[in-house]
Image (cartoon, rainbow, N blue to C red):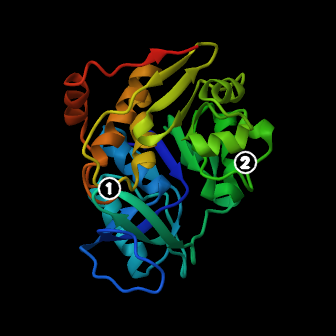
Amino acid sequence: MTKRPNLIGFGSIAVDDLVYISHFPRQGTKMQVDNLLRHGGGLAGTALVAAARLGANPSYFGVLGDDALSNFTIKAFQSENVKTDLCIKKIGAKPFHSIILVVRPNGERTILYTREGYTLPSKEDLAPEKFEGCEMIFIDSTAHPIFEHVCRIAHTLGIPILADIEHTTNLPHQSVLDTIQYWICNIEIARQFTGKTTPVDILRSLETTHRKASAITAGENGCWFKENNKPVHFLPAYPVDAMDTTGCGDVFHGAFAAAILRDSTIPDAIMQAAAAAAMKATQPGGRKGIPNLDHLLAFITNRKQITPKKIS
C-alpha cells in the first residue's frame, strides 16, 4: 500500500535556467557567461524537495501539462521522492520558467520569469479525502486564487499550515491569514505586511490565537522568530562561502516543515532551517546544495556556538 503524504504543497514550481556571470552587465552591452545550468525550482517545488531530503513524505498538488517543462518538473520531483499523484494533467499547463542571473563570487541573483501556462487546481479539485494522512500543508502566495479555500479546508480538517508570503497583494482576508499556524517570510515583506519596522515589533504583530510560530529571515544577517506567547529570539546566520543564494528561502521553509513533522521544537526547527539554507548557498541552483538529515545535523553540531538568543 502506498504511503500517504504527510506534507502537501501548493504554489509555484519552476524550471530555472541559471546564467552565471562575473558581474551584472551594463545596459546595451554584450558579455560572455561563465556557465549555464538547468534546475528545478519554485517556492513550493524547492521547499518540497528540501523536506523530502530531510525525511518528510511530500506531495505536490498542482496542474501540469505534457510539454518539455512539465515533463522536466515531474522527473525532477520523482528523482527526489516528491510524489506527483495529486497533480492534475491539463493541456497547456506549465510550471513557471525562470532565467536567473547569478553574479559570482557572492551568489547574488536577479530572477526573470514568465508564469505563462501556470495553472492552479480548482476548488472542485480540492476534495477533503485527498488530504487523508496529511500532517501539514505548505502554500505560497502565488496560489492566491485558492489560498483562502485551502486554508479553510486545512482548518476544518485540523491540518496546520506553513505559509510562504512573497508579496502583499491579492492575499485573503486577514481573518483567514490569522488561522495560519506557521508564518515565515523575509524581513522586507514582513515590514510591508505589518507596517512595523523592527523584528520585535513585526513578530509581536504577527502573533494570533492560532499562530504557533512566526519567523522573519534576512539572509546573511540572520533570522528572528517567536513562538506564541513567548519572547522573540534571534539566530545569527551560519557563516558559509556563498556561491548562489537561489532558493535559500524555499529551502528554509522545507527544512522547517520536515523538522516540525519530526516533532522538533520550534528553536530546533529554526536552526535546522537556517543551517539547510546556508548549506544550499554553497552550491549552484536552488536544490543541489540541499543536505540530507545526517549532513544537516553534523553541520549544526560542528557549529554549536550558533544558538538562538532571547532579545525581548
Q: Which residue does the image show at 76% across and 48% down from the upper left?
A: 172
- Secondary structure beneath label 2: helix
- Give the crowd class for mark 1: few <14, some 14-19, many >=20 residues within 10 Å: many
Q: Which residue is mark 2?
A: 148
Q: Residue 87, how many percent across, how many down?
A: 49, 62
Q: Is residue 212 left or right of residue 239?
A: right
Q: Residue 266, how many percent across, how many down?
A: 47, 22
- Give the crowd class for mark 2: few <14, some 14-19, many >=20 residues within 10 Å: some
Cα distance in 3D space between marks 1 and 2 = 33 Å
Residue type beneath disc 1: Asp
Residue type beneath disc 2: Glu
Q: Where, quadrant-wise, is the N terminus in this rendering?
A: top left
Q: Residue 195, how many percent across, how many down?
A: 74, 38
- Secondary structure beneath label 1: loop
122, above or below 49, in the image: below
Q: How many marks?
A: 2
Q: Where, quadrant-wise, is the C terminus in this rendering?
A: top right
Q: Residue 230, how many percent across, how many down?
A: 59, 13
Q: Is residue 84 visible?
A: yes
Q: Earlier in the sequence, mark 1 or mark 2?
A: 2
Q: Which residue is mark 1?
A: 244
Q: Is residue 95 visible?
A: no
